[in-house]
Image (cartoon, helix red, strand yellow):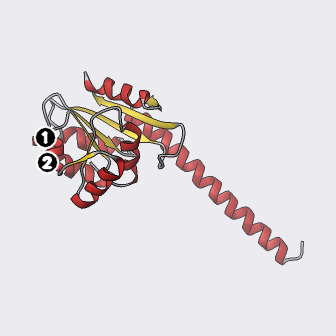
């Protein structure tokens, strides 16, 4: 579910390794993406009802409402996968909205292009039994490097990365400002 950049990247990663169907809010866009990638397309309801694994590559803020809308359509024993870069709050909301009979994995692909190699993916196995480990194996066999983490460990690591990134930008800004001041003063 989802025809944006991440949905398309995941389709390209998994294409030829499983039976994929593309769907999204915009049926015409889903049809166009499916044609371009040589896949099937469906409406969201048909896609969810007919799937053992549903991967939602949609904005994080839309996930809880989306899960509430589709939860009755999910097959017992199926796997729901969200693609989200924030885990703790999302995992709690999604987990609470999913039927207990549905497995749940949250992934964070650390790439935004099909051309990026290798593809690193953080996998948070929230509620898994049969399909969760098979999904991890599918990702790995597709060439992805899969690292498992808890939601808390994932968010802690991402916060550190974001802080370091922000600190580097602020340091560069200050260094450039100092250089401009020094040049203006004739140093």
Answer with the quarter of the image where residue 182 lies: bottom right
Q: Residue at x 35, y 52 (%)?
A: 36
- Tell me, yes or no, if residue 59 can be seen here: no
Q: Position of residue 106 (x, y in %)?
A: 33, 37
Residue that appears at 36% across and 38% down? 15
Q: Residue at x 64, y 59 (%)?
A: 170
Is 108 above or below relative to 24? above
Q: Secondary structure at mark 1?
A: helix
Badges 1 and 2: C-beta atoms under 8 Å apart?
A: yes
- Disc 1 residue crowd, few under 14, some 14–19, many 20+, Cα 10 Å: some
65 and 81: which is toward the camera: 81
In three-dimensional space, the C-alpha distance between marks 1 and 2, rounded to whole angstroms, equals: 6 Å
Q: Is residue 76 above or below residue 9?
A: above
Secondary structure beneath disc 2?
Answer: helix
Residue 40 spot, x, y in % from top left:
25, 45
Residue nearest the viewer, comparing 136 with 180: 136
Q: Position of residue 63 (x, y in %)?
A: 26, 49
Considering the image in quadrants, where does the C terminus appear? bottom right
Residue located farthest toward the top when viewing the structure as drawn: 130
Q: Going 37% across and 33% down the picture, which residue do you hit? A: 124
Residue 146 seen in the current view: yes
Q: In screen coordinates, is 87 left or right of 171?
A: left
Q: Which residue is mark 2?
A: 45
Residue nearest the viewer, comparing 39 with 56 = 39
x, y percentage for residue 128?
27, 26
Instruction: Identify the mark at residue 81; answer none if there is no mark.
Output: none
Q: Which residue reaches farthest right?
A: 187
Residue lying at the far left in this picture: please name it.
72
Dot 2 alpha-carbon crowd within 10 angstroms: few under 14, some 14 to 19, many 20 or more = some
- Provide the residue designation for mark 1: 49
Number of numbered discs overlaid on the protein picture: 2
């Amino acid at each position: 579910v989802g025809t944006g950049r991440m949905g398309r990247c995941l389709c390209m990663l998994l294409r030829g390794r499983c039976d994929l169907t593309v769907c999204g809010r915009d049926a015409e866009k889903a049809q166009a993406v499916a044609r371009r990638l040589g896949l099937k397309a469906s409406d969201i309801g048909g896609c969810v009802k007919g799937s053992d694994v549903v991967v939602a590559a949609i904005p994080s803020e839309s996930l809880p409402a989306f899960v509430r809308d589709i939860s009755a359509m999910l097959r017992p024993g199926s796997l729901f996968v969200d693609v989200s870069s924030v885990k703790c709050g999302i995992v709690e909301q999604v987990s609470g909205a999913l039927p207990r009979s549905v497995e749940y994995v949250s992934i964070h692909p650390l790439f935004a292009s099909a051309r990026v190699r290798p593809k690193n993916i953080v996998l948070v196995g929230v509620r898994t039994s049969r399909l969760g480990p098979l999904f991890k194996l599918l990702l790995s066999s597709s060439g992805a490097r899969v690292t498992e983490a808890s939601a808390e460990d994932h968010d802690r690591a991402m916060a550190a990365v974001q802080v370091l990134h922000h600190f580097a930008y602020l340091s560069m800004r200050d260094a450039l400002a100092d250089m401009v001041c020094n040049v203006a003063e004739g140093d």
